[in-house]
Image (cartoon, coloured by chain):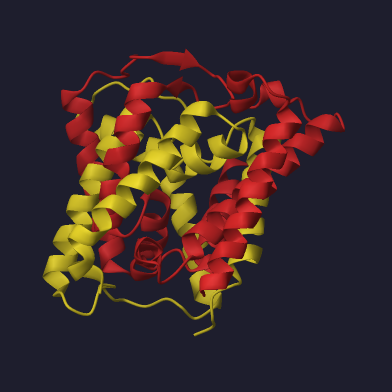
């Protein structure tokens, strides 16, 4: 198992990917819109939110799988804090995901499309979302400290 | 092209170690600053790239879709998102990375996201257009030149990197 890349180098590469998206697709890289599309297809509700094609989730997963494969980091496991059970971790993961989706639905984007891509394009809504998300995560963190430490 | 970009996006996130929930959660307990470092290196890179490519006439910045601004939904959505993020330990993109690399908790976050989108889609209006401000950017909002805002964001990022390195 190889060590992870330097965060600045990885961030630079991630930035180049987003830049390539600006240049070739005239938009940023969004992920929550794909979850929204997938849910819209499953429940047959309409969505006018642009971007997110459900299949994009598969591309992101394929890239991550390939990266982990060549770095020998593929592992069937459940990652959690040392003081909780796997079951608690899975429940928290599911619940957190549900709440996050509602936030992303309201804001029309998540960390990738809104914060990262929109942040780089200096969108006002993007920066509001980013600051609100970081502030809420820091404020709420002490309440779930037990699940991580 | 969208396929290549999606794959490269997942690849870069995995390289950074952002498929590991405890690593991401560490950001909010001051034990691991990978999230901040990766995110702001990426923002600065993409921002400077877009700025200079536009200055050099390679791209038309006005052609690139800037996410719109809806003050209240994005403030409220951001707060909800942040709470969900620290509980789940992964965001939508990184949940895909975690799940694809064998993490069961990543898959649980993905299922939660899908469920949350179902609930929101079936109960909330398609798009809440409260406090819509269109596609407004920080330079427009504050009436300062684009390049000045770019420089300020770079300065904030560099100060943040210096601060996290001093604490590491």
Numbered-mark total: 0
Can residue B49 be seen here? The reply is yes
Please name the color used to draw chain A. Answer: yellow
**Image location of residue A19, percent across then percent down:** 67, 43
What quarter of the picture does the N terminus of chain B occupy? Answer: top right
Q: Residue B125's image quarter?
A: top left
Left or right of residue B60: residue A19: left
The answer to whether residue A140 is above or below residue B79 is below
Residue found 49% across the figure and 22% down from its top: B68
Residue found 27% across the figure and 40% down from its top: B80
**Image location of residue B135, percent across then percent down:** 54, 19
Q: Residue A93's image quarter?
A: bottom left
Task: Work out whether residue B70 or residue B142 is closer to the camera in this orientation and state it.
Answer: B142
**Image location of residue B6, percent across then percent down:** 54, 48
Can residue B41 be seen here? The reply is no
**Image location of residue A1, percent across then percent down:** 49, 85
Task: Work out whether residue B65 or residue A60 is closer to the camera in this orientation and state it.
Answer: B65
The answer to whether residue B84 is above or below residue A105 is below
Chain identifier, colour red: B
Left or right of residue B12: residue B59: right
Task: Work out whether residue A136 or residue B58 is closer to the camera in this orientation and state it.
Answer: A136
Residue found 25% across the figure and 36% down from its top: A102
| Outermost residue, bottom side | A1
């Amino acid at each position: 198992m190889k060590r992870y890349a330097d965060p600045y180098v990885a961030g630079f590469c991630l930035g180049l990917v987003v830049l390539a998206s600006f240049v070739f697709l005239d938009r940023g890289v969004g992920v929550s819109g794909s979850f929204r599309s997938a849910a819209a297809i499953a429940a047959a509700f309409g969505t006018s939110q642009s971007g997110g094609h459900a299949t994009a989730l598969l591309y992101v997963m394929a890239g991550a799988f390939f990266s982990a494969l060549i770095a020998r980091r593929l592992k069937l496991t459940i990652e959690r804090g040392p003081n909780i059970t796997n079951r608690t971790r899975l429940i928290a993961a599911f619940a957190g995901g549900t709440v996050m989706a509602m936030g992303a639905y309201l804001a029309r984007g998540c960390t990738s499309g809104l914060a990262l891509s929109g942040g780089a394009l200096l969108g006002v809504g993007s920066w509001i979302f980013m600051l609100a998300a970081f502030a809420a995560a820091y404020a709420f963190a002490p309440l779930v400290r037990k699940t991580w430490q | 092209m969208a396929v290549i970009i999606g794959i490269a996006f997942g690849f870069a996130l995995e390289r950074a170690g952002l498929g590991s929930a405890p690593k991401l959660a560490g950001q909010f307990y001051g034990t691991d600053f990978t999230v901040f470092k990766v995110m702001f290196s990426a923002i600065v890179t993409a921002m400077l790239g877009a700025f200079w490519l536009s200055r050099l006439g390679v791209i038309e910045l006005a052609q690139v879709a800037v996410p719109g601004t809806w003050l209240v939904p994005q403030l409220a959505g951001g707060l909800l998102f942040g709470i969900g993020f620290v509980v789940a330990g992964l965001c939508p993109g990184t949940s895909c990375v975690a799940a694809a690399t064998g993490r069961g908790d990543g898959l649980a976050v993905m299922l939660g996201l899908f469920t949350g989108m179902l609930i929101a889609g079936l109960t909330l209006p398609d798009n809440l257009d409260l406090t819509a401000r269109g596609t407004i950017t920080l330079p427009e909002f504050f009436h300062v030149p684009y390049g000045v805002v770019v420089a300020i964001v770079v300065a904030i990022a560099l100060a943040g990197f210096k601060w996290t390195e001093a604490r590491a």
